[in-house]
Image (cartoon, rainbow, N blue to C red):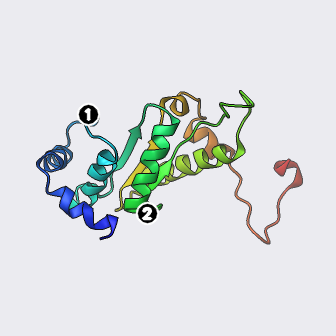
Amino acid sequence: MYLSELLPLFAKHPQVAALARMLTDGQPSLIHADGLKGSAAPVALASLTARGKAVGRTFLIIQTDEEEAGYFYHDLTQLLGDTQVMFYPSAYRRAVKYAQRDAANEILRTEVLDRLAARQTAPKDEPLFVVTFPAALSERVAPFQTVSDSTLLIEKGGTYDLTQLS
């Protein structure tokens, strides 16, 4: 049995059906799921895709800390693949070099923000699940318009003003 075969089975659970109805009715925008142990929460969320209730939606899953978020992210990617699930980490290292920026995490954060911005301008049919934790959300991010205005698109073979590039 493959993990993805669990989703239609789990989607038949009455509580998952109730969650799907809440999404269909457009209420509420904030859901607190409690009492789900182990991988039950990722499976419950992923099963919404089997019911067709997650189409085009963006889900922000906030876990208690980075470790829990990492486990949740891993479970969701095992169920849905890595195209529908993204991890939004902290931009800083927390252990050895406190307050040092982590380039790899900055890239992950940028990918999530780019994907969310793209979904605003051109909505997609597939759902997007973004897994994070409070420390990552508390870090400031430049407004979308500021980043958009400051972005310079460089194409291969193009001619550019050196002053503008610098």
Label 1: which residue?
A: 34
| Residue under the point 63% across and 42% down | 147
Q: State which tag comes first along the sequence, 2 or 1.
A: 1
Q: Residue furthest left?
A: 14
At mark 1, the secondary structure is loop
Q: Disc 2 vs disc 1: which is toward the camera?
A: 1
| Residue under the point 41% across and 36% down | 62
Assign the N terminus to one quadrant of the image.
Answer: bottom left
Separation of marks 2 and 1 at Cα, in angstroms: 25 Å
Asked whether, in this view, residue 140 is left or right of residue 8, the answer is right
Asked whether, in this view, residue 108 is left or right of residue 99, the answer is left
| Residue under the point 83% across and 51% down | 165
The reply to whether residue 16 is visible in this rendering is yes
- Pick whichever, 99 or 120, lies toward us: 99
Q: Position of residue 130 (x, y in %)?
A: 44, 46
Q: Amino acid at mark 1?
A: Asp
- Pick whichever, 20 or 42, lies toward us: 42
Picture quadrant of residue 146:
top right
Q: Which mark is residue 153?
A: none
Q: Is residue 71 above or below residue 4?
A: above
| Residue under the point 26% across and 56% down | 47
Label 2: which residue?
A: 81
Q: Is residue 80 above or below residue 148?
A: below
Q: Tally the marks.
A: 2
Asked whether, in this view, residue 140 is left or right of residue 9, the answer is right
